[in-house]
């Protein structure tokens, strides 16, 4: 018999050449990603707080976005009333 490491899963295989069969299979041990539950719990809480902060930031940006659009509209309306003979700006759809 001889031993071969699997190229896919890196398991140790014992093969019998006479029988042309795998006699023994031992899977490679995977290292633990988290040492203890308290570390995992604190990491999950930190990720939850980060998501909550990102959500709050997004909500605030949406609130200010409406104000920005309103101010831009008011400014462009003022410009249009001040100079009614000015040509309209080109839009992407006008170029087709």
Image (tube, rainbow, N blue to C red):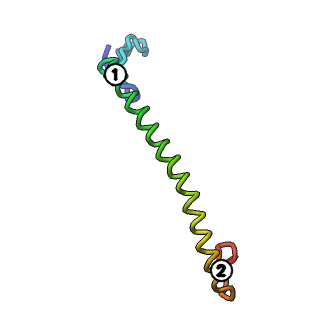
Instruction: Give the image location of residue 8, x and y in percent.
Output: 40, 29
Relative to 84, say whether 71 is above or below.
above
Instruction: Give the image location of residue 24, x and y in percent.
Output: 37, 11
Label 1, secondary structure: give it: loop
Left of 82 or right of it: where is 47?
A: left
User: Observer-nearest residue: 14 or 69?
Assistant: 69
Left of 93 or right of it: where is 47?
A: left
Quarter that holds the N terminus: top left
Q: Which residue is mark 1?
A: 30
Q: Which residue is mark 2?
A: 80
Label 2, secondary structure: give it: helix
Relative to 49, say whether 90 is above or below.
below
Residue at 31% x, 23% y is 39
User: Observer-nearest residue: 78 or 95?
Assistant: 78
Crowding at mark 1 (Cα within 10 Å: few <14, some 14-19, many 20+) = few
Q: CA distance from mark 2 to mark 1?
A: 68 Å
- Dividing the picture into quadrants, the one containing residue 6 is top left
Crowding at mark 2 (Cα within 10 Å: few <14, some 14-19, many 20+) = some
Residue at 41% x, 14% y is 22
């Amino acid at each position: 018999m001889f031993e071969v490491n699997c190229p896919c899963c890196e398991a140790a295989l014992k093969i019998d050449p006479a029988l042309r069969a795998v006699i023994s299979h031992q899977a490679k041990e995977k290292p633990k990603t988290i040492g203890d539950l308290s570390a995992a719990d604190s990491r999950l809480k930190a990720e939850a707080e980060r998501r909550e902060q990102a959500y709050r930031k997004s909500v605030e940006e949406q609130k200010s976005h409406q104000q920005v659009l309103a101010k831009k509209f008011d400014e462009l309306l003022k410009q249009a009333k001040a100079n009614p003979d000015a040509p309209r700006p080109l839009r992407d759809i006008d170029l087709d």
